Amino acid sequence: MSGASGAAVPGAAASGTGASGSAPVPAVPAAGAPTPAAPDQALERWRLVLGAPAEQWTGPLGPAAAAQDAALDWLYGRDEDLARRGVRRTPPPTREGGDGPSQLTAVDWLEDVHRLFPRETIERLERDAVERYGIEEIVTDPTVLERVEPSATLLRAVLRTKHLMDERLLTLARRIVEAVVRQLLERLRPELRQALTGTRSARPGTRRLARDFDFRRTVRANLGRYQPAERRILIERPHFHSRTRRHLEQWQLILLVDQSGSMVGSVIHSAVTAACLWGLPGLKTHLIAFDTAVVDLTADVTDPVELLMRVQLGGGTDIARAVDYAAGLVENPRRTIVAVISDFYEGGDRYRLVRAVRALVEQGSTVLGLAALDEEAAPAYDRDLAAQLARVGAHMGAMTPGMLATFVAERLGR
């Protein structure tokens, strides 16, 4: 063999002429020689978004981004549409036997995504894993349930799969339910109660009424004008409370919640909303769940965790039967709000439902049809039936719990 110099090793200067037949020896970079460039983070992000075909333009991934790509491939590699477009390069994991390397499990994958991605991305990946690809191991594997961070996505998954769980799994799943419900209660209770009852603030009011006189604040503000000889304070500026608390007469709020699988987010927020409103002065709250049967859950409203663990998602939908049940609870029609929370894909008698809603409206009740009651208020519903209900006097829409509380408060304030 000739003694021509060997090929240069990437990232190193070419070696000198080697001995005949010998392999080229990589040279040590000379002082001041440029070091290999670090991967461009912007290009790496585009590569992660666009998939393997983009690598010819973005270049190879660094170690950290490659680990992220592997985690993304484990999940989105099972997407047939993406596979046809060549966006992902790793086939979905199989359950076949063999002597190859062990497959990544849901537990391993969860640990990887919690290590590799920010919280917002983790929540999206977990949501897609459970809701888009049906990876039920995330909520039916005790190892996962012991380690996973509670989230609204996992709560929805627990409610959908709890019928598959044994006692040990149900105990672990309850931890997720309790944690998420506690977060929702802490966030929603002040908002809902303030919307319905108002507050009593300490700032000066514009209407100076004797019943709103703020004695303590007035004394503190005028202590400098105390007259020892006369043992009295000269009040230069009295202070008053600003009262915005509404006087509530007795009203009924009847929440009818469709417990079909597509309404799981609304079921959760209905349970929490009912718990927040329970015991408010002047408001009597009922919570009714329905599919083809009707279950009155009012007795469990004060414990939304237990209530959600009792809910059975799925089955058919008979909205008319639920509305008939609500009509039987009405005490004073003109002080009653019946909120039907459903996608309005009626499996029962549509004409019977329209007649029942018309009867409630004609006797003076307020009927509210909600295609969604959750934080996103993004509905998917039968628009034709919703239009029919609107024509007989129902108020149709989609709301967050706060918007529902404001709607109720407006009616109570009449």
Image (spheres, helix red, strand yellow):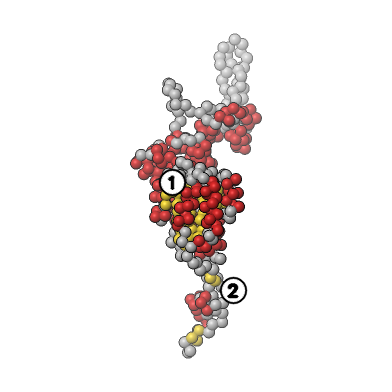
Q: In which quarter of the image is the C terminus?
A: bottom right
Is disc 1 placed on a helix, strand or loop?
loop
Residue 124 shows up from this direction: yes
Residue sitting at x 52%, y 75%: 212
Q: Given this view, does label 2 or label 1 mark the residue nearer the observer? A: 1
- Compared across the picture, whether 412 is left or right of 164 comes to right
How far across and down, in percent of the image, does residue 21 sit?
57, 12
Q: Residues within 10 Å of mark 1 (few under 14, many from 20)?
A: few
Is disc 2 placed on a helix, strand or loop?
loop
Whether 184 is drawn above or below 93: the answer is: below
Specify the farthest residue to the bottom.
229
How far across and down, in percent of the image, does residue 78 sit?
52, 30
Please state which amino acid type lies under the numbered disc 1.
Answer: Ala
Residue sitting at x 56%, y 20%: 25
Q: How crowded is mark 2: few (under 14 residues within 10 Å), some or many (20 or more)?
A: few
How far across and down, in percent of the image, does residue 71 sit?
51, 34
| Residue to which mark 2 is pinned | 206
Whether 46 is drawn above or below 397: the answer is: above
Residue sitting at x 51%, y 63%: 335
Say which of 376 and 93 sits in front.
376
Whether 74 is drawn above or below 211: the answer is: above
Say which of 341 and 11 sits in front.
341
- Which is nearer the N-term, disc 2 or disc 1? 2
Residue sitting at x 47%, y 52%: 324
| Residue to which mark 1 is pinned | 293
Say which of 123 and 355 sits in front.
355
Q: Label 2, label 1: how many angstroms apart (C-alpha)?
A: 53 Å
Mark sitting on residue 335:
none
Specify the farthest residue to the right.
57
Please state which amino acid type lies under the numbered disc 2.
Answer: Thr
